[in-house]
Image: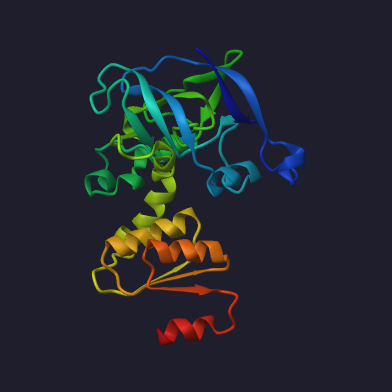
Amino acid sequence: MKIRSAVLRESGVTAPFASSLPLHIEEVELAPPGPGEVLVKMIAAGLCHSDLSVITGVRPRPLPMSLGHEASAQVMQVGAGVDNVRVGQTVALVFVPSCGHCSPCMEGRPALCEPGGNANARGELLTGHHRLSLAGSHINHHCGVSAFSDHAVVSARSCVPISEDIDPVEAAVFGCAVLTGVGAVVNTGQVRPGASALVVGLGGVGLSALLGALASGANPVVAVDVQQSKLDLARELGASLVVNAKDPDAVEKIREF
């Protein structure tokens, strides 16, 4: 089938990108899903600094590549052997597919899946295939998702079913920002109930870390940013103290709290 996708053909182009336009909306060919794969229709996609890192060349990836790596989507077709999702179901697409068999996966750390990470670096799906092409030449998949498209074929291991009461627009950031922020608190920081937590920077990842700290039972939870609107949101979400980093007394306020 033919789809529209945002394709990067050259990295390291001159900024500002509003002028150099490194991404091009192209009509490309999408092959049907093979065994273990799923055809999805995108609902919403998040914009992440990791996409920018590919554009700038800070994170080298094989080109051309269809970008985008966190999204929500509706399952349209499933390949042979897929039993974790069904047609019509809404799913969140994660930036690292998990094979379920490598050491990190078996230890409960699927975001560190070794085959998934290797496939991402090669621009392939977890199954080892490319399903995007143009004029007979492969277009690489970004993190096995390529969310800046109207449709995509992904590994079933990139799909996490979500319940109907979750807004799919909000669910689009579950696949990277929420995983990264909450994972930093729960897995890396191993924050325990009653521990104090300080979150500096309240973007998508930072706010997710804030929610992760609160869900872990941390108290107090201090949120720091330079934008008052983000501090106000952090307070609404349950932060014990919000501090504007521009305040010359910011450090003292945190220490005294």
Looking at the picture, how far across and down is residue 174, in whole percent?
39, 44
Q: Quadrant of residue 125?
A: top left
Residue at position x 44%, y 39% from top? 169
Query: Which residue is at the front of the view, 200 or 223?
Result: 223
Q: Is residue 133 above or below residue 54?
A: above
Q: Is residue 27 visible?
A: yes
Looking at the picture, how far across and down is residue 110, in whole percent?
30, 44
Tell me the quadrant of the picture where the C terminus can be found.
Answer: bottom left
Q: Is residue 137 above or below residue 48?
A: above
Residue at position x 47%, y 84% from top? 253
Query: Which residue is at the front of the view, 189 or 237?
Result: 237
Q: Quadrant of residue 40?
A: top left
Looking at the picture, how far across and down is residue 26, in whole percent?
63, 22
Query: Which residue is at the front of the view, 193 or 112?
Result: 193
Give the total number of marks visible in the rendering: 0
Residue at position x 35%, y 32% from top? 91
Residue at position x 25%, y 74% from top? 194
Q: Is residue 203 above or below residue 132?
A: below
215 lies left or right of 249: left
Q: Is residue 64 visible?
A: no
> Is the image coloured rainbow, by chain, by secondary structure, or in one colour?
rainbow
Looking at the picture, how far across and down is residue 234, in whole percent?
44, 63
